[in-house]
Amino acid sequence: MVSETDTSAIGNALVVLGAAGIVIPAFARFRITPVIGFILVGLLVGPSGLGSLAGDYPWLRHVTIASTEDIALFAEFGIILLLFSIGLELSFRRLWQLRKLVFGVGAAELLLGGAILGGALMLFGSYSAPAAFGLGIALALSSTAIVLPIAGTKSAVGRASFSMLLFEDLAIVPIIFLLGALSPTATGDSAELLITTLWQGALVVAVLALAGWFLLPRIFAQAARAKDPELFLAASLLVVIVAALATATVGLSPIVGALLAGVMIAETEYHGEVEAITAPFKGLALGVFLISVGMGLNLKTIADQWPQLIAAVVGVVAIKATVTAALLRFSGVARRGTATEVGLLMASPSETTLIVLTAALAAQLIDPETASFWQLVTAIGLTITPLLARVGHDIARRIEMRSGDTQVDETPAGRTVVVGFGRVGRTVAELLRDHQRPYIAVDADIDTVATARRDGFLVRFADVARPGSLDKLGIENADAVVLTMDDPVQQLRMTKQMRQKYPKLPIISRARDADHAAALYQAGATDAVPETLESSLQLAEAVLIDLGVAMGPVIASIHDVRAKMRREIMTKGDLDQEPRIRKLRAQPPSRGEETA
């Protein structure tokens, strides 16, 4: 016989899964982040929405959730899974590279933001110093669960955001103990307890890292031999739960253990398989958490206190955005557009703000009414985070657009100029950067330029189709020019112009086929690389290697074929190019390819 408790749990699971099945596809269809959808679902089915009518309409109990406590455990597990998936995208090497951002800018952002917010609360809110400190440091925290899925961890925006969020997650435990020490009823044991927690936490993290280095490859090797995807999933969840419980046992946040578990698995050769198997849980985990946030919104309280709530949200967002953007900009970590985007993305309070507010309430630093007000401010802030991210992206794009035209006047000596920054131009720039060769890229699409800059590439806005634009690039100082746009006529025209002005300049151009390459050679290109030729050579290379031919002879034969075909193309370049040009004019550039 199914008990009433079991029925309630089944109903809650039905609501969450139904929301995920409806919200994600519906909002994806309209290209809207599902974050807002999940929060609205939580508001609709929560205790202040349809759940408040369940007493009058009993059937609503099957499609509503009575209280946030009913899914609090699932929401916490959702955050743990989300942090685990983020850890899979990292490695110890990347974390070491980010150490200055984490403990430099991250620490400054939290402490300075908390101090300014606390000072404003003391000045305008008449809070005591301990209460203002607790509220200020709580509101200075930003949402790991929402920010990182929006920004990722590989772009310039994502790296800066992740570094500051990582420091905030590590600082949660010291903050909670410090609030306990400020309590009117605090004893002298708080400092000793904090020190004990910190050294035990460091020991647990070290043990987990060492155990992961020895055990994880062996555990996943056994799962791989069994060729059973369920074993990979079970092993992954086991590692996450063990790591989260280990850090929680010594007083650290369980999300620290989850993040560490992801990083440890990322160091193994099985991280791709684990990431693919656990990917479906990422969206669902975030959805459960966001539904719990929406359930915390009380429409009646919002209606009664909307002027104070709007003022509080605007004040917190403005202060945090200003502090974060200024620190990133003046520390030289990010460009102006990137700093602005990160500032707005990190401007809202966090899910951990709710934890710190609860700790401040338990320490009797604030009263229940104050805690309830700022919890509502936090929920509203989490709701508008995707909107702030969109606004920040648009502002950053405009900033990059304005700065782009003023930065195209000069190219320092010794750089390679890459014209066009689509998939081909980006690949060329990545390889130049990997081999530590200086470069500068240009593109006529400002969205492409803004995205590339956020990803850390040196790209400027310039339309080389306009007369005189080539002169502003300072090509006379370049070591080489690479033409990657997919416009054969424009490539021929640019190649002729540059060859006439700069007889000794190496010009390497992307070509559609052998005929286009021959025309480019005749126009003055140093090298022209036909896409059809390279794709056929890569295909042949893959076939030979799969057939068991040694890598050395394969590479040598591919090199010989490439050299032979290049000689043939260059020989064609001595022929009349007019028929080929007419043929190229009749073939419009394919959509979605690079433009310059």
Image (cartoon, rainbow, N blue to C red):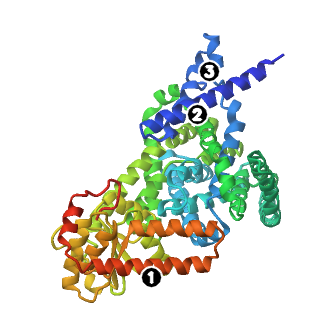
Report the mark closest to the observer, 1 or 2. 1
Q: Secondary structure at mark 1?
A: loop
Residue 447 versus residue 293: which sits nearer the camera?
447
Q: Residues within 10 Å of mark 2 (few under 14, many from 20)?
A: many
Q: Does 364 appear above or below 581?
A: above
Q: Does 396 appear above or below 289?
A: below
Q: Quadrant of residue 164?
A: bottom right
Residue in the image at 26% along x and 85% along y: 476
Q: Which residue is mark 2?
A: 20
Residue 312 lies left or right of residue 93; in this view the side is left
Q: Which residue is mark 3?
A: 63
Outermost residue to the left: 467
Tell me residue 68's x, y (percent). 66, 31
Instruction: Name which residue type carries label 3.
Output: Val
Tell me residue 388's x, y (percent). 43, 47
Tell me residue 111's x, y (percent). 57, 61
CB atoms at circles 1 and 2 under 8 Å apart? Answer: no
Q: Secondary structure at mark 3?
A: loop
The earlier-in-sequence mark between 3 and 2 is 2
Q: Quadrant of residue 45?
A: top right
Q: Which residue is mark 1?
A: 437
Instruction: Name which residue type carries label 1.
Output: Arg
